[in-house]
Image (spheres, rainbow, N blue to C red):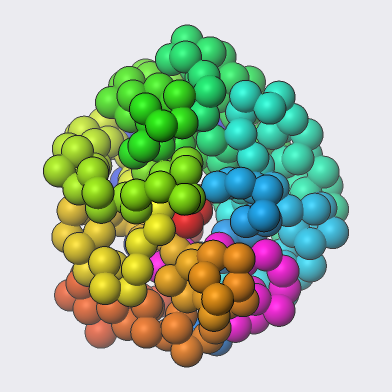
């Protein structure tokens, strides 16, 4: 997607397991375990914490040609998401396929304006991903149904449904609502990534709700979300994700996504 007005009727392009990593070493283990998409973020800075530009550049260099990579840029309300994206994109030899920033603390109107500004600042070829928080009441974010409608109206073609409070309930605490949001996003022509404290045992269920991509971090780390990515846990998650999709495997070579955990 080259901007907020791209054709949202384009075919969905996401599929498989996304693993969020905090450095190149974790990215290497995520790739070795079979992750289809590598997402760069710093979990110590929040649900979509932005990593430093040199970290993003190192991950980009490592995964170039092996898998697409995406970029977390913090919260839109902080006012610096575009700056984070610009620094990372300038530092990386290969651009991310997508970038995202969270909606916490914004009214629907504020979110639309902030998201449009963020999307407009991304380099050509970097797709802006709309983010909806399933725990929107806890995080003072817009209702996901509103985000989906607004995102579709401005031509966004990818949605991430996540949780903003990583100390609160996981995504599947709102499973019925999540299924409705995914269906609404698909009806609007958007691909959907599902994230938010998902465990290995919940991967198949998340896929079963209709998610095109399942995004994880804590489930594939030794020591939880702030621990270290383990390639064996990634392999287990990748196998579960593929099995839930009815595939023998998911080939990263045919994934061209955008999406965090």
Residue occupying image coordinates x 40% and y 53%? 196
In the image shown, does 66 or 212 lie closer to the viewer?
Answer: 212
Report the span colored magenta: 17-30
Residue placed furthest toward the front = 167
x and y, in percent, of residue 257 in the image? 47, 55
In the image shown, does 134 or 28 lie closer to the viewer?
Answer: 134
**Residue 159 visible, this angle:** no
In the image shown, does 226 or 233 lie closer to the viewer?
Answer: 226
Indicate left or right for 152 with 70 as reference: left
Residue occupying image coordinates x 54% and y 35%? 102
x and y, in percent, of residue 237 in the image? 37, 77
Residue occupying image coordinates x 28% and y 26%? 145
Residue placed furthest toward the bottom = 232
The correct choice, above or below, for 184 with respect to 65 in the image is above
Instruction: Report which quarter residue 183 is drawn in.
Output: top left
Residue occupying image coordinates x 43% and y 71%? 219
Magenta-drawn stretch contains 210: no
x and y, in percent, of residue 69 in the image? 59, 60
Q: How many numbered circles does the render carry?
A: 0
x and y, in percent, of residue 30 in the image? 55, 78
Indicate left or right for 85 with 48 as reference: right
**Residue 223 visible, this angle:** yes
The correct choice, above or below, for 142 with respect to 56 in the image is above
The correct choice, above or below, for 112 with respect to 229 in the image is above
Indicate left or right for 190 with 205 as reference: right
């Amino acid at each position: 997607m080259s901007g907020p007005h791209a054709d949202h009727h384009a075919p969905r392009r996401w599929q498989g397991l996304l693993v969020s990593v905090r450095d190149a070493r974790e990215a290497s283990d995520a790739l070795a375990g079979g992750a289809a998409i590598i997402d760069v973020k710093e979990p110590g800075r929040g649900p979509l914490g932005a990593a430093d530009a040199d970290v993003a550049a190192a991950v980009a260099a490592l995964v170039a040609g092996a898998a697409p990579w995406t970029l977390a840029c913090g919260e839109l309300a902080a006012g610096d998401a575009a700056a984070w994206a610009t620094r990372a994109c300038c530092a990386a030899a290969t651009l991310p396929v997508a970038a995202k920033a969270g909606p916490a603390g914004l009214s629907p109107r504020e979110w639309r304006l902030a998201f449009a500004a963020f999307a407009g600042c991304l380099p050509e070829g970097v797709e802006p991903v709309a983010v909806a928080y399933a725990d929107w009441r806890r995080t003072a974010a817009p209702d996901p149904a509103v985000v989906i409608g607004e995102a579709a109206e401005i031509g966004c073609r990818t949605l991430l449904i996540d949780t903003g409070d990583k100390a609160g309930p996981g995504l599947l605490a709102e499973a019925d609502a999540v299924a409705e949001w995914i269906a609404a996003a698909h009806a609007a022509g958007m691909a959907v990534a599902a994230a938010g404290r998902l465990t290995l045992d919940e991967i198949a269920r998340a896929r079963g709700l209709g998610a095109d991509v399942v995004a994880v971090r804590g489930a594939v780390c030794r020591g939880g979300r702030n621990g270290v990515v383990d390639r064996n846990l990634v392999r287990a998650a990748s196998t579960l994700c593929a099995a839930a999709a009815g595939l023998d495997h998911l080939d990263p070579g045919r994934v061209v996504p955008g999406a965090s955990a």
